[in-house]
Image (spheres, helix red, strand yellow):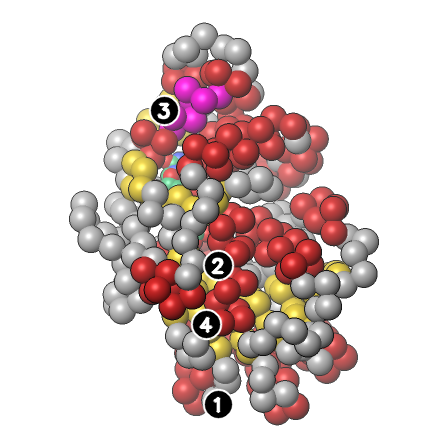
């Protein structure tokens, strides 16, 4: 999709963690585009994430649910979108284990609604493009070695990853059956500012600040590949504009960490930041009951996006963690806000130290 002419772009889930970074990136990089952020503002969506762009001329927010076909069809018929970048999703694996249906509802049903609305958009604009933002979890788990490539067979293990695999399949099926122009990308674990503190990195930063236990699942020997969220936003820009139709691109950080090693690193960095004695935060580590169906290892071969589109991560883990920790220390109000309400109820149920 060429970049020079004005466009109307819909970003779904733009008030969430990755979504808000993508909205900011597009609003700032493309002043001649109009960026519409559609978000239903669940517990994980927060317009405070977008304070710096909320008054931009080329930005609008619409509160609404992608599951509501009447609402999405109406939005599409009014705005005449040139493209959709679809990030709206329930994303937390643990929540999917206790409430799988809400993941089917948003991630599958919601995606299919958007696909239906997009078919109407293509009739008026053959250059329309649907971009589905997905996850490496669709591939299931790796052993100690190997990497996920774009041709790794899907083998999702959690209700969350099953719902994302299903939505990927629907997107591809709409391409095959109805000729919908699409691209998909599957990314590894993101981290950075505005990450809701139910995921490992922000939860543990928050708990260290508050001297609360750090609940490491099982023996902690699970491996994830971490990517700074702004690098992901830059990759999404490239895939949206330059990715080949009907293709999938894997996006990863080439940055594997075992959970226990990452937890210890966070403890050391935070002790320094908070002027605590070395070893203070490590005492908070608590091994707890494992996540059912816990995938051992995710690691991405991101060579296709590098080869075809020239993308590679630019923020080192050291730099990214420093920025992330500083952001949480400077934004206690944000933390207090997002950890009230639903968060408190959820965590009282899950983790009794
Ligand atoms: C929240 C939490 C997590 N963990 C473990 C489970 C995982 O092995 C690892 C990271 O967990 P999470 O932060 O929940 O992320 P994970 O399950 O890997 O999934 C993330 O990364 C995926 C991409 O790989 C995204 O598609 C998901 O939306 C995102 O939530 O840390 C703990 O040991 N203790 C915890 O309290």
Residues packed near mark 1 inside 10 Å, few (<14), some (14 to 19) or many (20 plus)? few
Query: If you read the primary sequence from the N terminus, does the residue marked by circle 3 or circle 1 appear first?
Result: 1
Question: Which quadrant of the picture is home to ligand 1?
Answer: top left
Figure check: 274 above or below 333 = above
**Residue 149 in sight here:** yes
N-term mark: 3 or 4 = 4
Q: Where's the N terminus, which quadrant? A: bottom right
Q: Earlier in the sequence, mark 4 or mark 2?
A: 2
Give the image location of residue 148, x and y in percent.
27, 58
Crowd band around label 3 with a 10 angstrom C-alpha radius: few (<14), some (14–19), many (20+): some
Identify the residue at image location x=43%, y=49%. 313
Distance in Å between CA atoms under marks 3 and 1: 50 Å
C-alpha span from label 2 to label 3? 29 Å
Q: Secondary structure at mark 1?
A: helix
How many labels, in total?
A: 4
**Residue ID for mark 1:** 178
Say whether disc 1 or disc 2 marks the residue closer to the N-terminus: 1
Q: What secondary structure prevails in the magenta region?
A: helix
Q: Between marks 4 and 1, how big is the CA–CA gap?
A: 20 Å
Could one spot residue 167 in this view of the protein?
Answer: no
Q: Is residue 348 magenta?
A: no
Q: Which residue is mark 4?
A: 243
> Helix, strand, or loop for circle 4?
loop
């Amino acid at each position: 999709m060429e970049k020079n002419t004005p466009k109307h772009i819909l970003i779904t889930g733009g008030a969430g963690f990755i979504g808000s970074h993508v909205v900011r990136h597009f609003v700032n990089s493309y002043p001649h585009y109009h960026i519409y952020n559609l978000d239903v503002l669940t517990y994980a969506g927060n317009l405070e994430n977008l304070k710096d762009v909320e008054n931009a001329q080329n930005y609008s927010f619409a509160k609404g649910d992608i599951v509501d076909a009447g609402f999405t069809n109406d939005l599409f018929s009014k705005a005449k979108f040139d493209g959709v970048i679809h990030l709206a999703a329930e994303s937390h694996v643990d929540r999917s284990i206790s409430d799988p249906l809400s993941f089917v509802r948003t991630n599958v049903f919601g995606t299919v609604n958007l696909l239906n609305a997009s078919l109407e958009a293509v009739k008026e604009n053959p250059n329309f493009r649907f971009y589905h933002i997905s996850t490496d979890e669709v591939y299931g788990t790796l052993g100690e070695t190997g990497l996920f490539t774009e041709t790794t067979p899907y083998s999702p293990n959690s209700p969350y990853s099953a719902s994302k695999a299903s939505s990927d399949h629907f997107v591809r099926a709409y391409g095959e059956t109805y000729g919908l122009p699409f691209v998909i990308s599957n990314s590894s674990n993101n981290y950075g500012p505005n990450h809701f503190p139910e995921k490992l990195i922000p939860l543990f930063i928050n708990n260290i600040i508050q001297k609360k236990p750090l609940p490491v699942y099982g023996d902690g020997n699970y491996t994830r590949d971490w990517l700074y969220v702004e690098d992901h936003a830059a990759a999404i820009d490239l895939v949206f504009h330059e990715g080949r139709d009907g293709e999938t691109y894997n996006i990863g950080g080439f940055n594997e960490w075992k959970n226990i090693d990452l937890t210890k690193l966070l403890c050391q960095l935070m002790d320094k930041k908070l002027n605590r004695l070395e070893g203070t935060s490590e005492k908070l580590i608590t091994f707890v009951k494992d996540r059912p169906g816990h995938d051992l290892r995710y690691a991405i071969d991101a060579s296709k996006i590098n080869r075809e589109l020239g993308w590679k991560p630019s923020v080192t883990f050291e730099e990214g963690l420093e920025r992330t920790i500083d952001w949480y220390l400077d934004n206690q109000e944000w933390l207090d806000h997002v950890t009230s309400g639903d968060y408190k109820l959820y965590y009282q149920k899950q983790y009794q130290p």
